[in-house]
Amino acid sequence: MLKFPFERLDAFQGKSAAIKRPREITQFSFDEQHKHHLDQRSLRYYYPPFVQVPYIPDKHRIDLSQGFETFSRHDDSVNLGLNPLLDTIRHYEEQNGAKLDADILTWRVAPFDFFGEYIEENQAAKAAELQASKDMNQRANKSLDKMQFWGYKFETLATLPKQWQDCTRDEIEGRENEIVDNHAQYCSVVRTGIGNHSIVIGGEVDAVEGCKPDDPNEPIPYVELKTSEDFHAGDNFAAKKFERKMLRFWAQSFLLGVPKVIIGFRSKDGHLQRLEEWKTLDIPSFVKNRGMRSWDGNICINFAAAFLDFLKQHITGEGTWTIEQKKGEKQILLSKIADAYDKDIVPPRFREHRATF
Ligand code: A3P
Ligand code: MG
Ligand code: MG
C-alpha cells in the first residue's frame, strides 16, 4: 500500500499547473429507460424558468416540491461502471479508425454529497453509507429525498427538449406540470490535460444555452444547473457554506469545460426565489478576491496534478488498484489488489476491440 499525504495543503500553493481547455470528442445519451445511445437525443436546452419576484407571498412562487409524489426516479444502485463510456469510445475509435490516446480515462467525479466525504466512486461504500444515514433517521432521509428532488425539478423547469423556436407553447408553458424524470441523461466526453497528464473525461451535462456550434473548435455553451438555499447579505455563516459549495460547482463544471453555472436560489422550504449566473472560470477569483478564501482554485489544480503524478509513478503495467481516502484522514491510499485487469471494470469487449488497433 502506498500513501499520498496531504497534511499541508499550502504545499500545493502557487501558480497553477498547466491546464488544457477541455474539448468535446463525442457525446452519448441515456433515454427515458436509461438505455445507452450513441447520440445526443437527451440533450436539453436551457430556457429560464418563470421566476417571480421574491416579495410575492410564497404560495404564488414556484414550489420545487410540486410533483414530488410522481417523481420517476432512476435507481442508481444499478451501477453500469465504465461500460457506457467505454462503449462510446469503442464506437468513436471504430468510426475514426484511430485510437484515442490518453493517460487517464474516467467519469468526472466531483466530490459531491451532502456531507462531503467521498473521493472515490466505490459504489458499495457509498450505498453502505447511504443506508446508514437512512437507518439513522427516517425523517431526515425523507427531507434529503425531497431536497434531491428540488434539484431535478429545477432542471425540468429550466430546460426544454428542443430549441425554443422548435417547441410548442405547451412544451414551454407546461414545464411546471411535467413529470420529473431523471432516467434520461446527456453526457459529453472531453479530452483535457492537467499538468503532464492527458485525460479523457465523461460526464453528465444539464443543458446547452442556445445550441451546439457547428464548428467543432468553438467552445460549447453548456450550462450546469444547481439549486441552493438563499441567504441574506451579512449572514456570514451561510455565505461561507455557499462558498464551499461553489468549490463543487466549479470543479464539476471546470473539468468538463462547462462555461456557465446557473444557480436557482430557493427558500428553506423549496420555493424558487431567483437565478444567478456564474462564469465557471470566475468562481475561483471571486472566492479569492471578494469571498472568504475558504478554498483556492490553484491549490486544487496543483493537488490534482501532483496526485496524477503519484498515480502515474506507481500504476505501471497491468493490474487493478484501489484508491481510498478514509474519512478525516489527510492521505490517499493506493493499493494493488490484482495483477490483472478486472473484467467487471474493463469488459472483454473493450479489450478485444483495443487489441485490433
Ligand atoms: P442540485 O445540485 O441542484 O442539488 P447535478 O447538479 O450534478 O446535475 O445533479 C442534479 C441533482 O441531482 C442535484 O441537484 C441533486 O439533487 C441530485 N444529485 C446529484 N448527485 C447526487 C449525489 N451524489 N447524491 C445525491 N443527490 C445527487
Ligand atoms: Mg446534472
Ligand atoms: Mg445540475
Image (cartoon, rainbow, N blue to C red):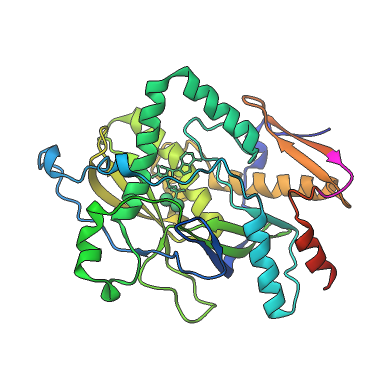
Front position in the image: 6 or 76: 76
Taking the spot 64% from the left edge, 66% from the top edge, the residue there is: 88
The answer to whether residue 224 is left or right of residue 271 is: right
Front position in the image: 8 or 121: 121
Q: Is residue 73 above or below residue 30?
A: above
The answer to whether residue 26 is left or right of residue 356 is: left
Magenta segment includes 340: yes
Where residue 51 sits in the image (x, y, percent)? 20, 52
Where residue 2 sits in the image (x, y, percent)? 82, 34
Taking the spot 60% from the left edge, 64% from the top edge, the residue there is: 190
Q: Quadrant of the C terminus?
A: bottom right
Q: Quadrant of the N terminus?
A: top right
The answer to whether residue 215 is left or right of residue 53 is: right
Secondary structure mostly seen in magenta is loop
Q: Which residues are magenta?
A: 337-341
Where residue 92 sits in the image (x, y, percent)? 66, 72
Front position in the image: 58 or 67: 67
Q: Is residue 140 above or below residue 169?
A: above
Q: Is residue 35 above or below residue 152?
A: below
